[in-house]
Amino acid sequence: MLLYATRRFGLALLILIVAVTVMFLMIRAVPGDPVQIMLGPRATPELQARLTAELALDQPIWKQLLIFYGNLMQGDLGIDVFSGRSVTEIVFQQLPHTLWLILGSIAWSATLGIALGAYAAAHPNTLIDRVTAAISVSFVAAPAFVVALLSLLIFAVNLQWFPAIGAGEGFWGRLNHLVLPAFAIGLSWVGYIARLVRASMLEVMGESHIRTARAFGLHERRVVMVYALRIAILPVVTVIGVGMGFLLSSAVFAEIVFARPGLGKLVIDSITTRNYPIVMGSVLISTGLFVVSTALADLINAWLDPRARTAN
Amino acid sequence: MTDRLLEIDRLSVDYETARGDLKALRDISFDVRKGEIVGIVGESGCGKSTLISSILRLTAPNTRFRQGKVRFKGQDLLQLPERKMRDLRGADISIVFQDPMQTHNPVLSIGQQMLDIQHRSKASKADKRARAAQMLGAVGIPDPEARLDQFPHEFSGGMRQRIAIAMALMSEPDLLIADEPTTALDATLEVQIIERLQELQQEFDCAILFISHHLGVIAELCDRVVVMYAGAVVESGEVREIFHDPKHPYTRRLIDCDPGHIKERARVLPTIPGEVPDLANLPGGCIFRDRCDQATARCMSQVPPLAKLKEGHHAACWLNHKEAAE
């Protein structure tokens, strides 16, 4: 298990380096001189030259990359040109808001999705199964930004159950502000996970070892909850791990619609102002988040499934 | 009555399908006495699997019990409430399934699974573990204590089948159902498993219902044989009787086709021509008539009853009836 974990995280690091390098090159390929856009048309040539030197934009691209990685090793993502604050500080200030949003969405959608899916699989082709299927499909089909706008309109504006904008203060305030955005970006995941669990569960329930467990008189609840669900859950863990990436992108919608602080909003704002250091910093952190979550998903699977541990 | 452990009494089972009812078992009758080994032989699709899942009542949802009884120690299992039935499974009646590679849960350790199936026992966890290790030792798994913590994929096929046997015998059942336990294994392992089963049967004194299509194994192991064809019993009796004096053409052909019986070098291995009839749409008369080279007009129209020929030998063929010979 330890060997597996080490190897898995080594791989994660490699992926991260490749992803960040590609991202670094891509942002350089965007047309337009960043210095001009950042400083505006009335900036003096001296000021432009100073910023160019500060951002090392006058260096060849491979050198820029080396400088970037050199700074990264020291935890330095550069300085925001507008505020003069450290990018690391700005990004890490926004990160918790997005993290809570994503974890909140995953938590409620996975809980509900797994419960619905397992229930539907235990009663295949009944009315309840069909209703769950219909609900799941309509959930999957609903785009996050539409759900976000509608739920904002209904629950925040008309019914006034939940606050419409901001992130809130204190634990309960934050939680209260989290409900609508987490609902909006988690909804399609409920349907998706429910479908996945149902299919996976039905497949596992048909395997011969389930018949063996029953033939030994094990209680049906134990057969379903331990003998079947533990296997049926494996693809769901993988999907959730990869889903963190999708959730990061739907978090952008939610953060804009609900005017929440967070990584998504930060990235959008800094892309429009060509604020390279902040874009790079946020993308690095999001990529890191994604790579770590997929690696974690693999580790959880390896812990649940002994076959994954020994396989290469 | 007293020595009859399992009595299958005129059992008929259908599967409801879109094509109509599939008559998987028709009018099956035989019994298993205490401590006896009864073999069931037949081609694939003859209803062997339906039969054992009917005994354990672990049938697919589209199964319909049309008639008959499955009596175990005198009580009809088909009438038993599910809770009572569950109490019997793995306690009084145990089963070893066909494919050892699929029979254990892949994500739980062997020890965990062997502990779980002792769910009725009040013993401490340590005692249950010791019992599990002792059973693994009994089926010849070396270093059983340590191997309890391993997972199914860390064992070979033969070992997994021995573990399955250990699990089935752990509760000291009165009846062990062995569903082609050696089919998925190679020949040398087959002999090992059969010998082990024989020893354990002596030790635990349980009856075994042994399902196989391997006649050699049946002849070696069993006291009595039931020959099934297309969902019906065509012949049953003592092993010696069946093998030395088969009274049903199907049994004869089956013995002729067994590789152990082929003495001369043959270019083409003997087969039984024709196909098993469509169970959803059975023709009238004898079910074997289309593949039988001795079929008469009577076989076309009338179903031959499973008739007693002498003590302990039954066959369902018109050729055994005097008037048919004329």
Image (cartoon, rainbow, N blue to C red):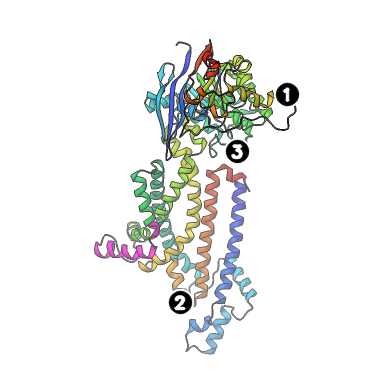
Among all residues in the image, which is located at the extreme left? A159
Question: Could you tell me residue B204's position as x and y percent?
Answer: 55, 17
Residue under label 3, please give it.
B153
Residue at mark 2 to residue at mark 1: CA–CA distance? 88 Å
Residue at mark 3 to residue at mark 1: CA–CA distance? 40 Å
For this rendering, which residue is in front, B57 or B155?
B57
Q: Amino acid at mark 1?
A: Lys
Chain of the residue under label 2 = A
Mark 3 vs mark 1: tell me if same chain: yes
Q: Residue at x 42, y 27 (%)?
A: B86
Do the numbered discs 2 and 1 sit on residues whose CB atoms are within 8 Å?
no
Chain of the residue under label 3 = B
SS type, badge 2:
helix
Residue under label 1, please give it.
B263
* Image quadrant where residue B2 sits: top left
Q: In this picture, is B77 found above or below A82?
A: above
Residue at mark 2 to residue at mark 3: CA–CA distance? 55 Å
Q: Amino acid at mark 2?
A: Thr
Question: Could you tell me residue B42's position as x and y percent?
Answer: 56, 27
The answer, for residue A221, to whether it is visible in the render is: yes
Which segment did they paint magenta?
A: A139-168
SS type, badge 3:
helix
Residue under label 2, please give it.
A272
